[in-house]
Image (cartoon, helix red, strand yellow):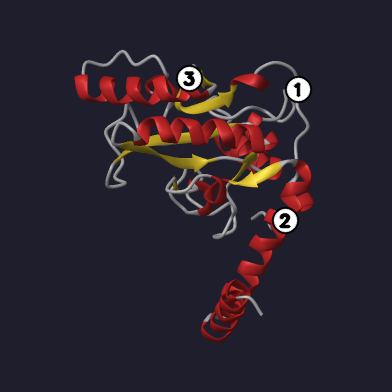
Amino acid sequence: MPAFYRLAALSLIFFTTCSSPEERRSAVVLTRSVDKAARFDLVDVRAEIPGIAVDLRYATTRNVTKRRLYPRDMPCLLRRSTATKLKRAHEILRAQGYGIRVWDAYRPPEIQTALFNKGHRTGMFLSPEAGWSRHCAGIAVDATLVNRWGLEVRMPTYFDEHPEQTKSDYIGSDPEVKANLTRFQSAMKQAGFTPLEAEWWHFDDADFTTGRHPVIFGWELGIPVM
């Protein structure tokens, strides 16, 4: 047996022996979801972009709903061509001593409905009756800028804050925030993304900014939505 496969087998044995039943079930769900995602031309961002930071906020309670909406091991998925653009943006920023942290990528439509129900009065989330978010097709990403040590730098606001303060056209007076946002937006635009006017952290794949695009439901990927 080649050395690589022996190592993989030993790793699986170690994981199975030392992890809890819940962790093992979660890992199986994650692997199956990524495998199923490939059929929809979705790829695992963590695998496609070495060194990128991922902190899916809806897999935690640190979001506008104050509860976990994604599984803890939710895969960070994007359409393959969109992930290629994100990789390019990350490389541009890495050359400058910075990097990207992803807050949200592919979002199951079931979760979009839950978010709209929670924040419909604020205008933060698109109504499913008007159309699905581009997140639901894997062609949009929510992200922020980090420094060379992986720490988030100062930006106009945090994630999912009130729309009056989150516009991509920063009009504040803080020169550090302005410089950080300009650097981030420049890299994302250069890589092929279009910023969303209402949210500085949201970027759409510029190749998919017109027309409607097929969404992929969580159940199609085997992702248990909360």
Q: Which quadrant would residue 207 be assigned to in this image?
A: top right
Residue at which label 3 appears: 189
- The mark nearer the N terminus, 2 or 3, is 2
The answer to whether residue 143 is seen in the rendering is yes
Report the residue at 76% width, 22% height from top: 212
Q: Which quadrant would residue 16 be assigned to in this image?
A: bottom right
Does residue 188 appear left or right of residue 134 in this picture? Answer: left
Label 2, secondary structure: give it.
helix
Separation (CA) of disc 2 from disc 3: 30 Å
Is 5 situated above or below 57? below
The residue closer to the viewer here, 190 or 219, is 190
Residue at which label 2 appears: 35
- The mark nearer the N terminus, 1 or 3, is 3
Report the residue at 44% width, 45% height from top: 52
The amino acid type of the residue labelled 1 equals Arg
Residue at which label 1 appears: 212
Residue at the bottom extreme, as displayed = 17
Does residue 187 appear left or right of residue 30 in this picture? Answer: left
- Measured as percent of width and height from the top left, residue 168 is found at 42, 19
Which numbered mark, 1 or 3, is in the foreground of this view?
3
The amino acid type of the residue labelled 3 equals Lys
The answer to whether residue 158 is seen in the rendering is no
- Measured as percent of width and height from the top left, residue 222 is found at 74, 57
The amino acid type of the residue labelled 2 equals Asp
Separation (CA) of disc 1 from disc 2: 25 Å
The residue closer to the viewer here, 126 or 154, is 154
